[in-house]
Amino acid sequence: MTGTPAPFTAGDYEARMRRAAEAAADAGLDGVLIAPGPDLVWLTGYRPVETERLTLLVLRAGQDPVLVVPTLEAPDAAAAAPMLTLRDWTDGKDPYEAAASLVGSEGRFGVSDNSWALHLLGLQGRLPDTRYVALTEALPMLRAVKDAAEVARLAEAGAAADAAYEEIRKVPFAGRREADVAADLAELLRHFGHSQVDFTIVASGPNGANPHHEAGERVIERGDMVVLDFGGLKHGYGSDTSRTVHVGEPDLEERRVHDVVRAAQEAGVAAVRPGAACQDVDRAARAVITEAGYGEFFIHRTGHGIGVTTHEPPYMIEGEELPLVPGMCFSVEPGIYLPGRFGVRIEDIVTVTEEGGWRLNTTSREMAIVD
């Protein structure tokens, strides 16, 4: 593990905001409106609590960025994002009037995808002639392409998740609850530097056929296949990896299914190259599983983007024609899920380079035998 990376500077955030405003203008938008959430964190470094009180960043090309913020939160905003002009409002006043004066009475604006309906409807009530579009629809590449510093943070988070996997393989599985192994996994992620653990899926036996199973009270048995899927944030950037282990020796069908998923994952990663469409990654992985006779049991997309959150655009899914560009980072995670029996998933984070796909996870993708 490397040391703590240098923090992003005010200049870094100013460049991101300027790029967002200019991209919006190029896309025919009058600006972008950013609510608390991953877009605001990426653009400013400010991570407020999402509440019923309006916080809104207004970006327009050629104008200084302005943050509408509750007065009681203004000191924190000023400390976290000193490059911003603040327009604060107090309880009892109308926050949407303050925002409306910055937006204008008409125009078309990109709005961060996770904006609360409460706030968007409040703004629409003041500006009935203003139109809005989801930010990822209007500017799909805004956060999708990572710079070298971001890729380095993702690689560091991936290495920490890999270290956690190597250690979790050493703990007892048989005779323990899924929740116990999940707690061990969360502790390992924190031990290896994660400040936030987002999920620790431990899906044993028939529970493995549920891709997003919540680790629970089921006692893991010898002979179980166990899907492990875990991740969170380290240095503000995400990890997300999946491996499938077996408690004791697997039978022939379990080995075959695991081999098919491993081959599908290899095919998906091999399809990663500049200029390919996102859907090409999905098609490559899905073709292997379909040809092996398990197509109906691959029930989700092949991948999702990752950055300041563990799930974000772009998505590796049929119909997504967005071209891959160097710097994009996303998961490649095909799976087979046999209801009532078991599931298998293998997942790595991959970044697009000029030469193709570079895995940020390096642990073995072969089936591990655990006790």
Image: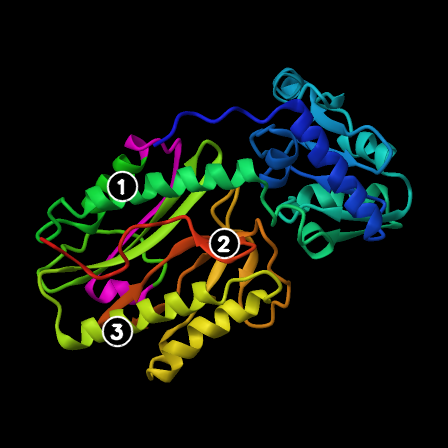
Callout 1, which amino acid? Answer: Ala
Residue 192 falls within the magenta-colored stretch: yes
Q: Identify the mark nearer the N-term, 2 or 1.
A: 1
Residue that badge 1 annotates:
164
Which residue is found at the position 59% from the left and 52% from the top?
326
Residue that badge 3 annotates:
257
Residue that badge 2 annotates:
330
The magenta-colored residue range is: 190-210
Q: Where residue 265 is drawn, which disc sits there?
A: none
Neighbor class of circle 2 (other Cα within 10 Å; few <14, some 14-19, many 20+) is many
Callout 3, which amino acid? Answer: Val
Mark 1 secondary-structure assignment: helix
Residue in the foreground of this view, choosing between 40 and 353: 353
Q: Is residue 289 above or below residue 166?
A: below
3D distance between C-alphas at marks 2 and 1? 20 Å
Q: Identify the mark nearer the N-term, 3 or 2.
A: 3
Q: Is residue 119 above or below residue 253?
A: above
Q: Is residue 233 above or below residue 226?
A: above
Q: Using the rendered view, name the quadrant where residue 346 is placed.
A: bottom left
Residue 43 falls within the magenta-colored stretch: no
Which residue is found at the position 27% from the left and 63% from the top?
208
Mark 2 secondary-structure assignment: strand
Q: Identify the mark nearer the N-term, 3 or 1.
A: 1
- Image position, residue 259 (x, y; %): 26, 71
Callout 2, which amino acid? Answer: Phe
State the residue lying farthest toward the front.
355
